[in-house]
Amino acid sequence: MNRTIPVFWPVLFVGLILTDTSKMTVSGSKKQFDGPIVMYDKNNIYVNYVFEENGTYSLQRDSFSLAHKEDIKLKVATDKENKFFEVQLQKKLKNEKTDYSDVDKLFVVSDIEGDFKAFRQLLQRNAIIDDQYNWIFGEGHLVLTGDFFDRGTMVTEVLWLIYSLEEKAKAAGGYVHFVLGNHEIMNLNNDLRYVHSKYMMGASLMNETYLNLYGEHSELGRWLRTKNITEKIGKILFMHAGISALLNSMEMSVSRINKIARPFYSDTTYDYKNVEVELLYSDLGPFWYRGYYYGTNKAGRSQIDSTLSYYKVKHIATGHTVVADTISVLHDGKLFNTDVHHAKGHSEGLLIENGKFFRATSLGEKFLIYE
């Protein structure tokens, strides 16, 4: 069953939306503006799509019995006109592991910020996915180190692509790691400073708060809560921002960091009673810290070495802070920064193959940067 709810928005607001989303998928004069947003109640699943046609926005809501969850096929738009990909809801969501064995191939991307085109091009031109959005990276691991939310106009589509690749990667013996950054946490705990206005409109059409779109009754919200804020793969430690000297001194294992942080992903009070939780959610926590790259107390070699020693790794990889137009190597290969200006055309990922580290461009070029 579905119903369509037409809504007319003020001309100024409509103009802003049309300008920012002019490259979205079009079918005739009607375009899929956002979605799907999958919500649950006790007995049903609701799949919501927002459409735009000649300045008019409408909501299509399809309802399904929970018993038919496996029959639902989601239709997700891309940056290319009339190009979609299908997503099937995962059977069961569970919290991710925190420690993984070494693998021969890793591809690391951060800070996409809703730029579907940049994300797609990086993955397709570096043989992670094909033109039909199927996984072709074999037993390789795709590592996403946060900030795929905010600023851009295709956040929903980016998230569904990650979601769909998880199952496809596992089937091929590979894996997708989605490590949360500060912008994922901000969207979960109602810090909406950087959310594009189109998403507020979509929430209003659904008669929901924006926070509820990623709440415990939404598929993407439930899925995000299974993710970690730091992970260890072989001899590489991944997080969005970094490990501060204070966090070093706390000697918290990777598993403990995630166990302590996860219950507070969606806490909107910001009133943390526990010292460890307070630290993890502060400017010195692993998804906010910028001390690796600037500040009066910029991290030196001894701090980096302390982290490497405690976690028994050889390298740290972060995003969060742009320091150059390319992937950066610091401290003689002990630290890699993967945050680049994707939206400005400086889109790269970090490719690791058999101990060699490469800058991988959106044209599919590879440049050796560390061995």
Image (cartoon, grey):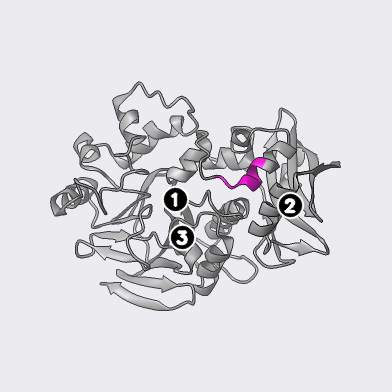
Q: Secondary structure at mark 2?
A: strand
Percent position of residue 91, x then y? 63, 44
Q: Residue at x 76, y 44 (%)?
A: 9
Q: Is residue 22 above or below residue 93?
A: below
Q: Secondary structure at mark 3?
A: strand
Circle nearer the viewer, 1 or 2: 1
Numbered marks: total: 3
CA gap between label 2 and label 3 equals 24 Å
Considering the whole magenta stretch, tell me its main secondary structure.
Answer: helix
Q: Residue at x 74, y 52 (%)?
A: 73
- What is the three-letter code of the residue carrying label 3? Leu
Q: Which residue is mark 3?
A: 142
The magenta span reads: 195-200
Mark 3, Cα crowd under 10 Å, few <14 / some 14-19 / many 20+, is many
Q: Secondary structure at mark 1?
A: loop
Residue 196 shown in magenta? yes
Residue 151 makes an appearance in the image: yes
276 or 164, nearer to the observer: 276
- What is the three-letter code of the residue carrying label 2? Lys
Q: Is residue 359 above or below residue 271?
A: below
Q: Quadrant of the N terminus?
A: top right
Percent position of residue 258, x then y? 38, 38
Q: Residue at x 20, y 45 (%)?
A: 310
Relative placement, left or right, of 44 versus 245 is: right
First reached walking from the N terminus: tag 1 or tag 2: 2
Q: Which residue is mark 1?
A: 146
Percent position of residue 192, x then y? 53, 39
